[in-house]
Amino acid sequence: MPTDVAVDAELLKAIAEPLRLRIVQLLSDEELCVCHLVEALDAAQPLVSHHLRVLRDAGLVETDRYRYWTYYRLRPEALAELGIAIAAIAQDTPTAGTRRRPCC
């Protein structure tokens, strides 16, 4: 892997959980508050709030207060950076037999 491109393991861990990945997918369409996500995911509010906190701590989502509610939105630049890092790994991967370390 190129040394100037690093994959953030915490970011990968954050989106690897199925419910959090679904939240990311839902937020890719529109800003949503917790009540919208609870309904769309058919999950308990405390569980959804927990997953949103993990996504926020990982830098994938940010919040905006509107009247009494907190709306969540996706940070597309965070996903783009992750995509670039993963694409760099794929691009640098050799084809079969082209780079092989000799065995002992």
Image (tube, rainbow, N blue to C red):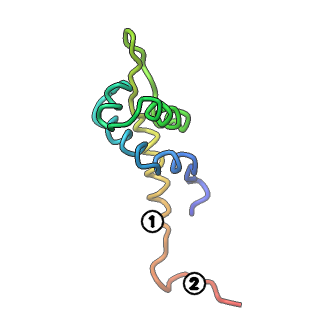
Q: Quadrant of the C terminus?
A: bottom right
Residue 16 % position (x, y): 47, 51
Element assignment for label 2: loop
Which residue is the site of mark 1?
A: 91
Q: How many marks?
A: 2
Secondary structure, mark 1, is: helix
Q: Residue at x 53, y 37 (%)?
A: 54
- Residue in view at x 33 percent, y 38 percent: 41
Under mark 2, the amino acid is Arg
- Quarter holding the N terminus is bottom right
For the residues bearing labels 2 and 1, Cβ distance under 8 angstroms: no
Q: CA distance from mark 2 to mark 1?
A: 17 Å
In front of the other: 30 or 2? 30
Label 1 crowding class (10 Å Cα cut-off): few <14, some 14-19, many 20+? few
- Give the vertical position of 52 relative to 92 (above or below): above
The residue positioned 53% from the left and 49% from the top of the image is: 13
Outermost residue, right side: 104
For the view shown, which residue lies furthest in the top direction?
67
Circle 2 residues within 10 Å: few <14, some 14–19, many ≥20: few
Q: Position of residue 86 (x, y in %)?
A: 47, 57
Between residue 42 and residue 30, name the one nearer to us: 42
Return the disc, 2 or 1, that comes first in the chain's sequence: 1
The outermost residue toward the bottom is 104
Q: Position of residue 100 (x, y in %)?
A: 57, 84
Q: Percent from the top left, x then y, of residue 35?
A: 35, 25
Q: Which mark is residue 52?
A: none
User: As shown in the figure, which amino acid type bears the numbered disc 1?
Assistant: Gln
* Residue matched to label 2: 100
